[in-house]
Amino acid sequence: MQARLIAYPPEGAATICLIQADGMLRLGRTPDSGLATAPAGSVHLVLDHPSVSRVHAELRGMPDGWRLIDMGSKNGSFVDGVQCTDAPLPPTCWLRFGDVHCEFATIDDTEASDRRQQVTARRALATAHTAQLQRMTGLGDLLDASLRAVLELAHCERGFVLLDNGNDYVVRTSLALDPTMLASRAFSGSVSAVRRALAERRTIVANDVARLSWLAERASVAIAGLNTLVCVPLFDGSRVLGAIYADRVRPGPAINDLDVDLLAAFADNAAMWIAAQRTRELLDAHASATAIEGGANGLPWDGIVAAHTGTAG
């Protein structure tokens, strides 16, 4: 049977791999050219984590089922918590390579087809959200629609949009959270994630917040039980225009590589429309006054950050 492996690195998006029944999956920290002579359908999964060896392990499809072969890794390979060097895999199990946990399952043709249909549906959903932005005629509506789209694409339940007003970032819109509470200890993890996304100019994803050292000790994890978060920066050319933050407390599907790609593509389009709409409003005297008023009434980001500076809670 075919197999599916979902890798959950401590930081970053989950990765989903489908492997043909007679194929092979090689796992390691760096891309490997040795697959040139491997069976058809073989793939390489890069697990970019220091606990994973350069060539760590292989999953091989055999006539009698799937096997895990450790390739002499430094930190070992584990099947349901038991270290092994060469072992048959049950139809479903948890694997661990170094400190990276993975979910393994054999799947039939119907399940593989369902996965491909899910990918198609996710892409269509992102396209629909992008098309919706083109119909927005006000900056407020555009920001609200952008936030709702990110929440749906990331399987999250609350969030906010941060936007540059010329002198500082301000929280311009939010859903299912009170922006005035962002300065409290309950949102220390959220603020830390947004600061990292802005500073590093990249999407920040945490599927298991409690496993990340820079988030696990934050009060938001202990107080709110924060489970998953994502922060997507918005760019206007080379300038960081702002960011869209989303999170959830309830369990749900992991944010995976496809989700991150769709979020990034959507954010690129959203940023373009946000920048254009704001420019149009500023060019009109009456709309300019409205935009300035909205920026002034937005919650200043510097004040939120200052409330968390120097605290680990």
Image: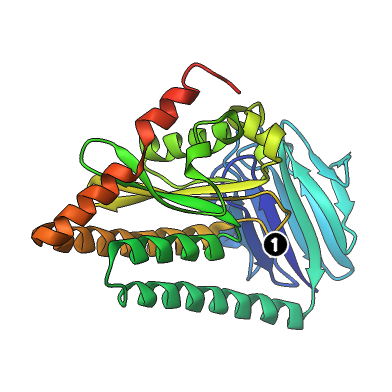
Q: Amino acid at mark 1?
A: Met
Q: Quadrant of residue 304?
A: top left
User: Considering the image in quadrants, where does the N terminus appear?
Assistant: bottom right
Which residue occupies the foreground of this view, 105 or 125? 125
Going by the image, does 130 lie left or right of 166? Answer: right
Q: Is residue 116 left or right of residue 245?
A: right
Q: Position of residue 250 (x, y in %)?
A: 72, 53
The residue under the point 66% across, 33% down is 51
Q: Would residue 41 be visible to someone looking at this image?
A: yes
Query: Is 262 above or below relative to 86?
Result: below
Q: 222 or 269, which lies in front?
A: 222
Residue 302 in which image quadrant: top left
User: Could you say where residue 59 lies in the image, as x and y percent from the top left?
Assistant: 75, 56
How far across and down, in percent of the image, does residue 45 sit?
61, 53
The colour scheme applied to this rendered structure is rainbow
Q: Residue at x 41, y 62 (%)?
A: 144
Quarter of the image with the C terminus is top right
